[in-house]
């Protein structure tokens, strides 16, 4: 297992976006899909627990009730602190969830990992790899973005400075910030498909060995 260097004293906040409808799969709570007998949420929370973040926020929207029930179960099971925030405007798209997450963050972090709830192969090792990339970034770089081939991946990491700048501009969100500041992105080129594999269709379920609950 990859080891996280301790020298940067990196205080990590983790945001998990779990507000989507899963419309391309017929309205399915993708965070509750199962892999190896566990929900994708449980797999992700296992990784979160190991990383000891200063803050862990989950944004819910569509399917809030069953997702929040599972989060409550996992919080008790793992003795894990989870801040659950419901996006009342989830139907307006992912950007509204991202903005809500940014506005909900505390002030005690150095870096935020923006994560998606439908990436079954993202775990502790993938997050640690990104954190090490962040620790080694240049001074002007405030974003670490994985890229596999020509495809952008997730999770993406943002410095506290970047988050503070976004919050100063109404409606500014992570993707727009990146588009406006390409010179501040550290692109991490990787051959690890985990960063680009997500569950959007029934074909993805078959390909990734995921099952419906």
Image (tube, helix red, strand yellow):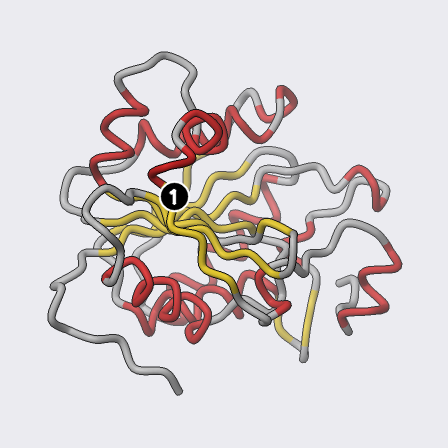
- The image shows residue 164, relative to residue 69, as above or below, that is above
x and y, in percent, of residue 15 in the image: 40, 47
Q: How many marks?
A: 1
Q: Residue at x 61, y 48 (%)?
A: 66
Q: Residue at x 71, y 37 (%)?
A: 21
Q: Specify few, some or many for label 1: CA neighbours under 10 Å numbering under 14, 14-19, or 20 or more.
A: many
- From the viewer's perspective, tell me whether residue 10 is left or right of residue 147: left
Q: Residue at x 21, y 35 (%)?
A: 161
Q: Residue at x 26, y 51 (%)?
A: 55
x and y, in percent, of residue 47 in the image: 42, 70
- From the viewer's perspective, tell me whether residue 187 is left or right of residue 20: left
Residue under label 1: 185
- From the viewer's perspective, tell me whether residue 160 is left or right of residue 133: left
- From the viewer's perspective, tell me whether residue 90 is left or right of residue 189: right
Q: What element does badge 1 sit on?
A: strand
Q: Which residue is nearer to you in this view: 118 or 184?
A: 184
- The image shows residue 36, relative to residue 155, as above or below, that is below
x and y, in percent, of residue 93 in the image: 62, 25
Please identify the residue farthest to the bottom as the structure is shown: 1
x and y, in percent, of residue 162 in the image: 28, 34
Res. 51 image quadrant: bottom left
Position of the C terminus, as image quadrant, is bottom right
Please identify the residue farthest to the front as the structure is shown: 183
Position of the N terminus, as image quadrant, is bottom left
């Amino acid at each position: 297992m990859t080891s996280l260097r301790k020298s940067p004293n990196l205080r990590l906040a983790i945001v998990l976006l779990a507000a989507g409808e899963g419309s391309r799969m017929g309205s399915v709570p993708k965070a509750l899909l199962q892999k190896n007998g566990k929900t994708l949420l449980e797999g992700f929370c296992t990784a979160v627990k190991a990383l000891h973040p200063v803050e862990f926020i989950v944004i819910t929207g569509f399917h809030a009730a069953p997702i929040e029930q599972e989060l409550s179960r996992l919080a008790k099971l793992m003795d894990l602190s989870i801040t659950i925030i419901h996006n009342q405007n989830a139907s307006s798209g992912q950007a509204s969830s991202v903005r809500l997450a940014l506005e909900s963050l505390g002030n005690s972090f150095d870096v935020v990992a923006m994560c998606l709830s439908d990436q079954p192969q993202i775990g502790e090792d993938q997050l640690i790899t990104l954190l090490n990339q962040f620790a080694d970034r240049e001074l002007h770089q405030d974003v670490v973005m994985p890229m596999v081939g020509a495809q952008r991946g997730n999770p993406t990491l943002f410095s506290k400075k970047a988050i503070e700048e976004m919050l100063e501009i109404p409606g500014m969100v992570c993707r727009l910030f990146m588009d406006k500041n390409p010179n501040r992105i550290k692109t991490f080129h990787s051959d690890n498909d985990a960063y680009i594999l997500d569950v959007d269709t029934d074909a993805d379920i078959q390909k990734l060995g995921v099952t419906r609950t």
